[in-house]
Amino acid sequence: MGMQMRNVFRRALCMVPLAFGLSFADAIPVGALSASGAQARDQQLREIRDVMRGGRGGFLDLGFNYTPLPTQLPLESPYGEHDGFAFKQHVAGFGSGEVARNTQLGALLWFERSGWDGEDFFVLPQYNDFSHVASLTTWGLTLTQARYDVTFAGGMQHYNVEHVGDVYPEENDSLLYSWAHLRWSHFSLQGNFHRSDVRFLRLSLDLESRLVYGGRSRGILTYLPNVDFTVYNKSADRFSADTYRMNWEQNLYGQVLYAEVSYDFPDDGFHSAALKYYPDASRMVAFEATCIRRNKEIDGTDDLLWGGGVEFPFVRFAYNSSYDYENFFHAKGTFIVEFQFNLAAIDGFLFARGGTRSAPLETITVEKKNKDKMPEGDKLIHLNQSDASTSVGNKPKTLEATGIRYEKSGDGNGGKQ
Amino acid sequence: MISRIVKKWTRSLLACCALLALPLVLTGCLSHWFLESETRLQLENATEDYSILSLDVVSLDGTAYSSWISETVLPGERSRVEEGDWIGEFKIRVKYTESKDASGDTLMDYRVLDFEGGSMYLQVTAKKGKLEYNFR
Protein backbone atom coordinates (compact mmCIF):
# COMPACT_ATOMS: atom_id res chain seq x y z
CA MET A 1 0.00 0.00 0.00
CA GLY A 2 2.75 2.38 1.00
CA MET A 3 4.68 1.72 -2.17
CA GLN A 4 1.59 2.12 -4.34
CA MET A 5 0.88 5.44 -2.70
CA ARG A 6 4.44 6.50 -3.30
CA ASN A 7 4.30 5.47 -6.93
CA VAL A 8 1.09 7.41 -7.41
CA PHE A 9 2.67 10.42 -5.76
CA ARG A 10 5.79 10.02 -7.83
CA ARG A 11 3.84 9.79 -11.04
CA ALA A 12 1.70 12.76 -10.10
CA LEU A 13 4.85 14.74 -9.40
CA CYS A 14 6.28 13.81 -12.76
CA MET A 15 3.04 14.77 -14.50
CA VAL A 16 3.51 18.43 -13.64
CA PRO A 17 6.54 19.02 -15.87
CA LEU A 18 5.23 16.45 -18.33
CA ALA A 19 2.26 18.68 -18.85
CA PHE A 20 4.59 21.48 -19.84
CA GLY A 21 6.53 19.11 -22.06
CA LEU A 22 9.83 19.69 -20.39
CA SER A 23 10.55 16.42 -18.71
CA PHE A 24 12.60 13.63 -20.30
CA ALA A 25 15.79 15.59 -20.24
CA ASP A 26 18.87 14.02 -21.67
CA ALA A 27 21.18 12.24 -19.29
CA ILE A 28 24.48 13.83 -18.40
CA PRO A 29 27.50 11.72 -19.35
CA VAL A 30 30.06 10.63 -16.73
CA GLY A 31 32.79 12.15 -18.91
CA ALA A 32 31.26 15.61 -18.54
CA LEU A 33 31.42 15.30 -14.74
CA SER A 34 35.03 14.22 -14.61
CA ALA A 35 36.00 16.99 -17.04
CA SER A 36 34.10 19.61 -15.04
CA GLY A 37 37.07 20.51 -12.82
CA ALA A 38 39.16 21.88 -15.67
CA GLN A 39 36.16 23.75 -17.07
CA ALA A 40 35.33 25.28 -13.67
CA ARG A 41 38.95 26.41 -13.13
CA ASP A 42 38.87 28.15 -16.48
CA GLN A 43 35.47 29.71 -15.84
CA GLN A 44 36.45 31.05 -12.40
CA LEU A 45 39.54 32.71 -13.78
CA ARG A 46 37.49 34.24 -16.61
CA GLU A 47 35.14 35.71 -14.00
CA ILE A 48 38.11 36.99 -12.01
CA ARG A 49 39.46 38.59 -15.19
CA ASP A 50 36.14 40.41 -15.67
CA VAL A 51 36.01 41.62 -12.07
CA MET A 52 39.66 42.71 -12.20
CA ARG A 53 38.97 45.10 -15.09
CA GLY A 54 38.89 47.93 -12.58
CA GLY A 55 41.25 46.28 -10.13
CA ARG A 56 39.43 47.85 -7.19
CA GLY A 57 35.96 48.09 -5.68
CA GLY A 58 34.12 44.93 -4.70
CA PHE A 59 32.17 42.00 -5.99
CA LEU A 60 29.67 39.54 -4.55
CA ASP A 61 28.18 36.47 -6.18
CA LEU A 62 26.13 33.59 -4.89
CA GLY A 63 23.84 31.05 -6.37
CA PHE A 64 22.77 27.48 -6.84
CA ASN A 65 20.99 25.40 -9.43
CA TYR A 66 17.57 24.03 -8.69
CA THR A 67 16.52 20.83 -10.41
CA PRO A 68 13.55 19.48 -8.48
CA LEU A 69 13.02 16.17 -10.31
CA PRO A 70 15.21 13.06 -10.17
CA THR A 71 14.39 12.34 -13.82
CA GLN A 72 15.40 15.83 -14.92
CA LEU A 73 19.15 15.29 -15.21
CA PRO A 74 19.81 11.57 -14.85
CA LEU A 75 23.35 10.23 -14.98
CA GLU A 76 24.39 8.20 -17.97
CA SER A 77 26.85 5.57 -16.78
CA PRO A 78 27.97 2.44 -18.62
CA TYR A 79 25.13 0.65 -16.81
CA GLY A 80 22.32 2.87 -18.02
CA GLU A 81 20.50 5.94 -16.76
CA HIS A 82 20.46 6.62 -13.04
CA ASP A 83 17.81 8.88 -11.53
CA GLY A 84 19.30 11.62 -9.42
CA PHE A 85 20.27 15.23 -9.20
CA ALA A 86 22.97 17.34 -10.79
CA PHE A 87 23.88 20.27 -8.56
CA LYS A 88 26.05 23.34 -8.48
CA GLN A 89 26.48 25.82 -5.65
CA HIS A 90 28.73 28.82 -5.96
CA VAL A 91 29.81 31.84 -3.98
CA ALA A 92 32.37 34.48 -4.78
CA GLY A 93 33.61 37.68 -3.21
CA PHE A 94 36.16 40.37 -3.80
CA GLY A 95 36.94 43.43 -1.73
CA SER A 96 39.66 46.03 -1.87
CA GLY A 97 40.77 49.14 -0.05
CA GLU A 98 43.28 51.93 -0.45
CA VAL A 99 46.41 51.20 1.56
CA ALA A 100 48.47 54.08 0.23
CA ARG A 101 47.86 56.93 -2.19
CA ASN A 102 46.70 55.40 -5.51
CA THR A 103 47.45 51.90 -4.25
CA GLN A 104 44.65 49.41 -3.69
CA LEU A 105 45.08 46.11 -1.92
CA GLY A 106 42.37 43.48 -2.22
CA ALA A 107 41.49 39.86 -1.62
CA LEU A 108 39.24 37.54 -3.56
CA LEU A 109 37.66 34.14 -3.04
CA TRP A 110 35.72 32.05 -5.53
CA PHE A 111 34.10 28.79 -4.41
CA GLU A 112 32.06 26.21 -6.24
CA ARG A 113 30.76 22.80 -5.24
CA SER A 114 29.22 20.71 -7.94
CA GLY A 115 28.52 17.24 -9.18
CA TRP A 116 25.83 14.62 -9.28
CA ASP A 117 24.22 12.78 -6.37
CA GLY A 118 21.38 10.36 -5.70
CA GLU A 119 19.64 12.85 -3.45
CA ASP A 120 18.95 16.53 -3.69
CA PHE A 121 20.60 18.20 -0.76
CA PHE A 122 21.97 21.47 0.36
CA VAL A 123 24.83 20.48 2.62
CA LEU A 124 25.15 16.72 2.99
CA PRO A 125 25.01 14.54 -0.13
CA GLN A 126 24.04 10.87 -0.17
CA TYR A 127 27.45 9.86 -1.60
CA ASN A 128 26.13 6.76 -3.34
CA ASP A 129 27.99 4.41 -5.70
CA PHE A 130 27.45 6.77 -8.63
CA SER A 131 27.91 10.18 -6.97
CA HIS A 132 30.51 12.67 -8.05
CA VAL A 133 30.98 15.53 -5.60
CA ALA A 134 33.85 17.97 -6.05
CA SER A 135 34.65 21.50 -5.01
CA LEU A 136 36.88 24.19 -6.37
CA THR A 137 38.26 27.11 -4.40
CA THR A 138 40.17 29.95 -5.98
CA TRP A 139 41.64 32.61 -3.74
CA GLY A 140 44.14 35.35 -4.18
CA LEU A 141 45.42 38.80 -3.38
CA THR A 142 45.25 41.79 -5.67
CA LEU A 143 47.34 44.91 -5.89
CA THR A 144 46.33 47.85 -8.04
CA GLN A 145 48.34 50.94 -8.80
CA ALA A 146 45.74 53.42 -10.01
CA ARG A 147 48.21 55.95 -11.34
CA TYR A 148 49.56 53.56 -13.97
CA ASP A 149 46.27 51.63 -14.23
CA VAL A 150 48.05 48.38 -13.43
CA THR A 151 46.72 45.40 -11.46
CA PHE A 152 48.61 42.40 -10.29
CA ALA A 153 46.73 39.46 -8.78
CA GLY A 154 47.78 35.99 -7.85
CA GLY A 155 46.81 33.06 -5.68
CA MET A 156 45.94 29.39 -5.56
CA GLN A 157 43.26 27.07 -6.86
CA HIS A 158 42.30 23.96 -4.91
CA TYR A 159 40.35 21.26 -6.71
CA ASN A 160 39.09 18.79 -4.16
CA VAL A 161 37.16 15.62 -4.95
CA GLU A 162 34.94 14.76 -2.00
CA HIS A 163 33.48 11.59 -3.39
CA VAL A 164 33.70 9.81 -6.71
CA GLY A 165 31.90 6.61 -7.75
CA ASP A 166 33.45 3.70 -9.62
CA VAL A 167 31.85 4.51 -12.94
CA TYR A 168 33.89 7.65 -13.56
CA PRO A 169 37.09 7.81 -15.57
CA GLU A 170 40.25 8.04 -13.52
CA GLU A 171 41.23 11.45 -12.22
CA ASN A 172 43.41 12.85 -9.51
CA ASP A 173 41.55 13.33 -6.27
CA SER A 174 42.98 16.63 -5.10
CA LEU A 175 45.02 19.09 -7.04
CA LEU A 176 46.64 22.36 -6.20
CA TYR A 177 47.08 24.96 -8.89
CA SER A 178 48.40 28.48 -8.81
CA TRP A 179 47.33 31.41 -10.92
CA ALA A 180 48.48 34.89 -11.74
CA HIS A 181 46.83 37.82 -13.44
CA LEU A 182 48.51 40.92 -14.77
CA ARG A 183 46.47 43.81 -16.13
CA TRP A 184 47.61 47.02 -17.71
CA SER A 185 44.81 49.30 -18.85
CA HIS A 186 42.73 47.30 -21.36
CA PHE A 187 45.16 44.43 -21.65
CA SER A 188 45.56 41.47 -19.36
CA LEU A 189 47.56 38.29 -19.19
CA GLN A 190 46.44 35.34 -17.12
CA GLY A 191 48.25 32.14 -16.29
CA ASN A 192 47.21 28.91 -14.58
CA PHE A 193 49.89 26.55 -13.35
CA HIS A 194 50.22 23.11 -11.80
CA ARG A 195 53.59 23.01 -10.06
CA SER A 196 55.97 24.18 -12.78
CA ASP A 197 53.63 23.20 -15.63
CA VAL A 198 51.63 25.83 -17.43
CA ARG A 199 48.02 24.68 -17.70
CA PHE A 200 46.81 27.61 -19.70
CA LEU A 201 47.76 31.14 -20.68
CA ARG A 202 45.25 33.77 -21.68
CA LEU A 203 45.76 37.14 -23.31
CA SER A 204 42.72 39.41 -23.09
CA LEU A 205 42.20 42.66 -24.93
CA ASP A 206 39.20 44.35 -23.31
CA LEU A 207 39.19 47.21 -25.74
CA GLU A 208 35.58 48.29 -25.22
CA SER A 209 35.25 51.60 -23.39
CA ARG A 210 33.20 51.29 -20.21
CA LEU A 211 31.70 54.14 -18.22
CA VAL A 212 32.06 52.37 -14.88
CA TYR A 213 35.82 52.19 -15.34
CA GLY A 214 36.11 55.83 -16.36
CA GLY A 215 35.49 55.30 -20.07
CA ARG A 216 32.85 56.60 -22.46
CA SER A 217 29.13 55.97 -22.26
CA ARG A 218 28.65 56.18 -26.03
CA GLY A 219 30.59 56.69 -29.19
CA ILE A 220 32.91 54.73 -31.39
CA LEU A 221 35.18 53.61 -28.53
CA THR A 222 32.35 51.58 -26.99
CA TYR A 223 32.19 49.53 -30.19
CA LEU A 224 35.72 48.20 -29.88
CA PRO A 225 35.74 44.42 -29.35
CA ASN A 226 36.77 42.36 -26.33
CA VAL A 227 38.96 39.59 -27.57
CA ASP A 228 40.73 36.88 -25.65
CA PHE A 229 43.04 34.18 -26.78
CA THR A 230 43.81 31.11 -24.64
CA VAL A 231 46.41 28.40 -25.04
CA TYR A 232 45.57 25.18 -23.21
CA ASN A 233 48.45 22.85 -22.45
CA LYS A 234 47.13 19.36 -23.05
CA SER A 235 50.40 17.50 -22.66
CA ALA A 236 49.08 15.87 -19.48
CA ASP A 237 46.27 14.25 -21.48
CA ARG A 238 48.01 11.48 -23.32
CA PHE A 239 46.13 11.72 -26.59
CA SER A 240 45.68 15.39 -27.30
CA ALA A 241 47.86 18.21 -28.51
CA ASP A 242 47.67 21.79 -27.29
CA THR A 243 44.50 23.63 -28.19
CA TYR A 244 43.77 27.30 -28.67
CA ARG A 245 40.53 29.13 -28.16
CA MET A 246 39.56 32.62 -29.21
CA ASN A 247 36.58 34.54 -27.85
CA TRP A 248 35.24 37.65 -29.48
CA GLU A 249 32.67 39.83 -27.70
CA GLN A 250 31.26 42.63 -29.80
CA ASN A 251 28.96 45.49 -28.86
CA LEU A 252 26.37 45.67 -31.62
CA TYR A 253 24.17 48.47 -30.35
CA GLY A 254 24.56 50.93 -27.49
CA GLN A 255 26.19 48.44 -25.09
CA VAL A 256 22.88 46.62 -24.70
CA LEU A 257 23.12 44.23 -27.63
CA TYR A 258 26.17 42.01 -27.92
CA ALA A 259 27.39 39.16 -30.05
CA GLU A 260 29.86 36.57 -28.81
CA VAL A 261 31.72 34.04 -30.87
CA SER A 262 34.17 31.43 -29.69
CA TYR A 263 36.44 29.51 -32.03
CA ASP A 264 38.88 26.64 -31.48
CA PHE A 265 42.21 26.29 -33.24
CA PRO A 266 43.76 24.51 -35.01
CA ASP A 267 41.33 21.68 -35.78
CA ASP A 268 38.00 21.99 -34.04
CA GLY A 269 36.76 25.23 -35.57
CA PHE A 270 33.55 26.88 -34.47
CA HIS A 271 32.78 26.33 -30.76
CA SER A 272 29.90 28.58 -29.74
CA ALA A 273 28.06 31.81 -30.45
CA ALA A 274 25.60 33.94 -28.56
CA LEU A 275 23.43 36.96 -29.08
CA LYS A 276 22.82 38.79 -25.81
CA TYR A 277 20.46 41.60 -25.03
CA TYR A 278 20.83 43.51 -21.77
CA PRO A 279 17.87 45.93 -21.40
CA ASP A 280 20.19 48.01 -19.26
CA ALA A 281 23.93 48.27 -19.68
CA SER A 282 24.41 47.39 -16.00
CA ARG A 283 23.63 43.79 -17.08
CA MET A 284 21.31 43.14 -14.15
CA VAL A 285 18.86 41.62 -16.62
CA ALA A 286 19.88 39.60 -19.64
CA PHE A 287 18.21 37.77 -22.51
CA GLU A 288 20.35 35.45 -24.56
CA ALA A 289 20.12 33.13 -27.52
CA THR A 290 23.00 30.71 -27.77
CA CYS A 291 24.38 28.05 -30.03
CA ILE A 292 27.10 25.58 -29.13
CA ARG A 293 28.77 22.84 -31.09
CA ARG A 294 28.52 19.56 -29.23
CA ASN A 295 31.58 17.47 -28.67
CA LYS A 296 31.71 14.31 -30.67
CA GLU A 297 33.98 12.50 -28.21
CA ILE A 298 31.69 12.94 -25.24
CA ASP A 299 28.24 13.13 -26.77
CA GLY A 300 28.77 10.94 -29.80
CA THR A 301 27.33 13.60 -32.04
CA ASP A 302 28.76 16.62 -33.75
CA ASP A 303 25.89 19.02 -34.14
CA LEU A 304 24.77 22.45 -33.03
CA LEU A 305 22.75 22.84 -29.85
CA TRP A 306 20.49 25.89 -29.89
CA GLY A 307 19.14 27.37 -26.72
CA GLY A 308 18.57 30.45 -24.68
CA GLY A 309 18.14 31.97 -21.28
CA VAL A 310 16.72 34.82 -19.26
CA GLU A 311 18.50 36.30 -16.27
CA PHE A 312 16.94 38.47 -13.60
CA PRO A 313 18.63 39.82 -10.47
CA PHE A 314 17.77 36.78 -8.36
CA VAL A 315 16.91 34.01 -10.76
CA ARG A 316 17.96 32.71 -14.12
CA PHE A 317 16.01 30.41 -16.43
CA ALA A 318 17.64 28.65 -19.32
CA TYR A 319 16.96 25.94 -21.84
CA ASN A 320 19.84 24.30 -23.70
CA SER A 321 21.95 27.40 -23.12
CA SER A 322 25.63 27.14 -23.99
CA TYR A 323 26.58 28.33 -20.48
CA ASP A 324 24.81 25.37 -18.85
CA TYR A 325 26.06 22.96 -21.47
CA GLU A 326 29.63 23.99 -20.69
CA ASN A 327 29.43 24.65 -16.97
CA PHE A 328 26.69 22.27 -15.83
CA PHE A 329 27.86 18.89 -17.14
CA HIS A 330 26.42 19.17 -20.65
CA ALA A 331 22.92 19.59 -19.28
CA LYS A 332 20.37 19.92 -22.01
CA GLY A 333 16.80 19.09 -22.87
CA THR A 334 15.42 20.53 -19.67
CA PHE A 335 14.67 23.88 -18.10
CA ILE A 336 17.40 24.92 -15.70
CA VAL A 337 16.57 27.24 -12.85
CA GLU A 338 19.43 28.94 -11.10
CA PHE A 339 18.85 31.12 -8.06
CA GLN A 340 21.69 33.54 -8.30
CA PHE A 341 22.78 37.04 -7.54
CA ASN A 342 25.87 38.97 -8.42
CA LEU A 343 26.80 42.57 -7.89
CA ALA A 344 29.95 44.50 -8.59
CA ALA A 345 30.76 47.87 -7.10
CA ILE A 346 33.34 50.43 -8.05
CA ASP A 347 33.51 54.09 -6.97
CA GLY A 348 29.87 53.92 -5.86
CA PHE A 349 28.64 52.45 -9.15
CA LEU A 350 26.69 49.22 -8.85
CA PHE A 351 26.40 46.77 -11.73
CA ALA A 352 26.42 43.07 -12.54
CA ARG A 353 29.59 41.34 -13.65
CA GLY A 354 30.62 42.54 -17.09
CA GLY A 355 28.33 45.59 -16.95
CA THR A 356 29.36 48.84 -18.51
CA ARG A 357 27.13 51.35 -16.77
CA SER A 358 25.68 51.79 -13.30
CA ALA A 359 22.38 50.16 -12.35
CA PRO A 360 19.32 52.36 -13.09
CA LEU A 361 18.06 52.02 -9.51
CA GLU A 362 20.74 54.35 -8.34
CA THR A 363 20.27 56.91 -11.08
CA ILE A 364 16.60 57.29 -10.18
CA THR A 365 17.46 57.92 -6.54
CA VAL A 366 19.91 60.62 -7.47
CA GLU A 367 17.46 62.32 -9.83
CA LYS A 368 14.74 62.32 -7.17
CA LYS A 369 17.02 63.84 -4.63
CA ASN A 370 17.94 66.67 -6.97
CA LYS A 371 14.38 67.35 -8.11
CA ASP A 372 12.69 67.91 -4.77
CA LYS A 373 15.62 69.00 -2.75
CA MET A 374 13.73 71.37 -0.47
CA PRO A 375 10.84 69.16 0.62
CA GLU A 376 13.28 66.32 1.08
CA GLY A 377 15.45 68.58 3.22
CA ASP A 378 12.44 69.64 5.31
CA LYS A 379 11.43 66.07 5.78
CA LEU A 380 14.89 65.31 6.92
CA ILE A 381 14.65 67.90 9.66
CA HIS A 382 11.22 66.64 10.70
CA LEU A 383 12.49 63.17 10.81
CA ASN A 384 15.33 64.18 13.03
CA GLN A 385 13.01 66.10 15.35
CA SER A 386 10.58 63.23 15.73
CA ASP A 387 13.52 61.02 16.33
CA ALA A 388 14.70 63.38 19.02
CA SER A 389 11.76 62.65 21.33
CA THR A 390 12.41 58.95 21.39
CA SER A 391 15.88 58.14 20.28
CA VAL A 392 18.74 57.69 22.66
CA GLY A 393 20.91 59.33 20.03
CA ASN A 394 19.71 62.76 21.29
CA LYS A 395 20.66 62.07 24.85
CA PRO A 396 23.01 65.06 25.15
CA LYS A 397 20.08 67.47 24.45
CA THR A 398 17.92 66.22 27.28
CA LEU A 399 20.70 65.30 29.59
CA GLU A 400 21.11 68.83 30.75
CA ALA A 401 17.47 69.16 31.98
CA THR A 402 17.39 66.35 34.48
CA GLY A 403 18.11 62.69 34.49
CA ILE A 404 14.64 62.04 35.95
CA ARG A 405 12.90 63.77 33.08
CA TYR A 406 14.77 61.63 30.59
CA GLU A 407 13.76 58.49 32.41
CA LYS A 408 10.13 59.58 32.51
CA SER A 409 9.96 60.21 28.77
CA GLY A 410 11.55 56.87 28.26
CA ASP A 411 8.82 55.18 30.38
CA GLY A 412 5.92 57.10 28.91
CA ASN A 413 6.70 57.23 25.24
CA GLY A 414 9.25 54.61 24.65
CA GLY A 415 7.00 51.71 25.52
CA LYS A 416 4.12 52.86 23.37
CA GLN A 417 6.02 53.91 20.30
CA MET B 1 16.12 59.56 5.41
CA ILE B 2 18.94 57.13 6.03
CA SER B 3 16.88 55.07 8.43
CA ARG B 4 14.17 54.85 5.77
CA ILE B 5 16.68 53.59 3.22
CA VAL B 6 17.99 51.09 5.74
CA LYS B 7 14.43 49.96 6.45
CA LYS B 8 13.72 49.64 2.74
CA TRP B 9 16.89 47.66 2.21
CA THR B 10 16.14 45.42 5.17
CA ARG B 11 12.71 44.76 3.76
CA SER B 12 14.05 43.88 0.30
CA LEU B 13 16.77 41.80 1.90
CA LEU B 14 14.13 39.90 3.85
CA ALA B 15 12.17 39.41 0.64
CA CYS B 16 15.28 38.01 -1.00
CA CYS B 17 15.86 35.67 1.92
CA ALA B 18 12.27 34.47 1.69
CA LEU B 19 12.72 33.93 -2.03
CA LEU B 20 15.88 31.93 -1.43
CA ALA B 21 14.34 30.03 1.47
CA LEU B 22 11.59 28.65 -0.73
CA PRO B 23 13.81 26.40 -2.87
CA LEU B 24 15.89 25.60 0.21
CA VAL B 25 12.82 24.18 1.86
CA LEU B 26 11.91 22.25 -1.25
CA THR B 27 15.36 20.84 -1.73
CA GLY B 28 16.89 18.14 0.40
CA CYS B 29 15.12 16.09 3.00
CA LEU B 30 11.59 17.06 2.08
CA SER B 31 11.70 15.28 -1.25
CA HIS B 32 12.63 12.07 0.57
CA TRP B 33 9.17 11.93 1.98
CA PHE B 34 8.11 10.58 -1.36
CA LEU B 35 11.31 9.86 -3.24
CA GLU B 36 13.60 6.94 -2.52
CA SER B 37 17.33 7.17 -3.13
CA GLU B 38 18.09 3.45 -2.96
CA THR B 39 16.48 0.19 -4.01
CA ARG B 40 16.00 -2.64 -1.52
CA LEU B 41 15.55 -5.67 -3.70
CA GLN B 42 14.20 -9.08 -2.78
CA LEU B 43 13.96 -11.84 -5.33
CA GLU B 44 11.45 -14.67 -5.27
CA ASN B 45 11.99 -17.77 -7.36
CA ALA B 46 8.38 -18.63 -8.27
CA THR B 47 9.40 -21.17 -10.88
CA GLU B 48 8.90 -24.87 -10.36
CA ASP B 49 12.06 -26.29 -11.82
CA TYR B 50 14.69 -23.58 -12.21
CA SER B 51 17.33 -22.57 -9.65
CA ILE B 52 18.48 -18.95 -9.64
CA LEU B 53 22.16 -18.49 -8.80
CA SER B 54 22.62 -14.70 -8.89
CA LEU B 55 21.34 -11.37 -10.14
CA ASP B 56 23.83 -8.82 -11.49
CA VAL B 57 23.59 -5.49 -13.22
CA VAL B 58 25.62 -5.46 -16.42
CA SER B 59 26.84 -2.53 -18.45
CA LEU B 60 25.06 -1.85 -21.72
CA ASP B 61 28.11 -2.90 -23.73
CA GLY B 62 28.46 -6.06 -21.65
CA THR B 63 32.03 -5.37 -20.57
CA ALA B 64 31.37 -4.72 -16.88
CA TYR B 65 29.03 -6.02 -14.24
CA SER B 66 28.14 -5.32 -10.66
CA SER B 67 26.70 -8.11 -8.55
CA TRP B 68 23.55 -7.38 -6.60
CA ILE B 69 22.06 -10.61 -5.30
CA SER B 70 24.69 -13.34 -5.04
CA GLU B 71 22.75 -16.09 -3.39
CA THR B 72 21.30 -19.31 -4.74
CA VAL B 73 17.52 -19.17 -4.66
CA LEU B 74 15.91 -22.57 -5.13
CA PRO B 75 12.35 -22.97 -6.52
CA GLY B 76 9.79 -21.51 -4.12
CA GLU B 77 12.40 -19.68 -2.05
CA ARG B 78 13.08 -16.02 -1.46
CA SER B 79 16.43 -14.24 -1.29
CA ARG B 80 17.62 -11.86 1.40
CA VAL B 81 16.86 -8.18 0.88
CA GLU B 82 19.85 -6.46 -0.70
CA GLU B 83 20.27 -2.70 -0.86
CA GLY B 84 21.68 -1.09 -4.01
CA ASP B 85 22.07 2.42 -5.42
CA TRP B 86 20.24 1.42 -8.58
CA ILE B 87 17.43 3.77 -9.50
CA GLY B 88 16.62 4.03 -13.17
CA GLU B 89 16.59 1.65 -16.08
CA PHE B 90 19.26 -1.04 -16.06
CA LYS B 91 20.17 -4.26 -17.79
CA ILE B 92 20.20 -7.21 -15.43
CA ARG B 93 21.70 -10.64 -15.83
CA VAL B 94 20.19 -13.59 -14.03
CA LYS B 95 22.28 -16.75 -13.78
CA TYR B 96 20.21 -19.90 -13.42
CA THR B 97 20.17 -23.66 -13.94
CA GLU B 98 17.48 -25.92 -15.34
CA SER B 99 17.35 -28.02 -12.19
CA LYS B 100 15.73 -27.91 -8.77
CA ASP B 101 19.00 -28.26 -6.84
CA ALA B 102 21.24 -25.77 -8.69
CA SER B 103 23.13 -28.53 -10.44
CA GLY B 104 23.95 -28.61 -14.14
CA ASP B 105 25.05 -25.97 -16.63
CA THR B 106 24.79 -22.31 -15.70
CA LEU B 107 22.56 -20.37 -18.08
CA MET B 108 22.18 -16.61 -18.34
CA ASP B 109 19.17 -14.44 -19.00
CA TYR B 110 19.40 -10.70 -19.78
CA ARG B 111 16.60 -8.21 -19.32
CA VAL B 112 16.21 -4.45 -19.03
CA LEU B 113 14.22 -3.54 -15.91
CA ASP B 114 13.05 -0.24 -14.46
CA PHE B 115 13.92 0.17 -10.77
CA GLU B 116 11.87 2.90 -9.15
CA GLY B 117 13.58 2.79 -5.78
CA GLY B 118 12.38 1.79 -2.35
CA SER B 119 11.41 -1.76 -1.43
CA MET B 120 11.00 -3.84 -4.56
CA TYR B 121 9.91 -7.44 -4.70
CA LEU B 122 10.92 -9.21 -7.90
CA GLN B 123 9.04 -12.37 -8.73
CA VAL B 124 10.60 -14.65 -11.32
CA THR B 125 8.29 -17.10 -13.08
CA ALA B 126 8.80 -19.43 -16.02
CA LYS B 127 6.52 -19.71 -19.03
CA LYS B 128 7.25 -22.05 -21.91
CA GLY B 129 10.91 -22.35 -20.91
CA LYS B 130 11.40 -18.58 -20.62
CA LEU B 131 11.94 -16.61 -17.44
CA GLU B 132 9.53 -13.76 -16.75
CA TYR B 133 10.02 -10.91 -14.29
CA ASN B 134 7.33 -9.07 -12.40
CA PHE B 135 7.59 -6.53 -9.63
CA ARG B 136 5.00 -7.03 -6.93
Image (spheres, coloured by chain):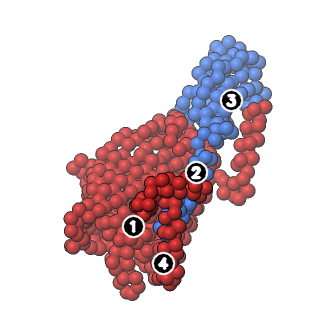
Chain colours: A red, B blue
Which residue is at the front of the view, A76 or A128?
A128
| Disc 4 element | helix
Q: Residue A120 at x, y = what percent?
A: 57, 43
Q: Earlier in the sequence, mark 2 or mark 3?
A: 2
Camera-side mark, 3 or 4: 4
Disc 2 versus disc 4: distance between alpha carbons? Answer: 39 Å
Camera-side mark, 1 or 4: 4
Residue A151 visible in the picture: yes
Name which residue type carries label 3: Ser
Q: Residue B107 at x, y = what percent?
A: 63, 24
Q: Are marks 1 and 2 in contact (CB under 8 Å)?
A: no
User: In the rendered image, which residue does mark 2 sit on?
Assistant: B21
**Callout 3 crowding tier (Cα within 10 Å): few <14, some 14–19, many ≥20:** some
User: In the rendered image, which residue does mark 3 sit on?
Assistant: B119
User: In the rendered image, which residue does mark 4 sit on?
Assistant: A377
**Callout 4 crowding tier (Cα within 10 Å): few <14, some 14–19, many ≥20:** few
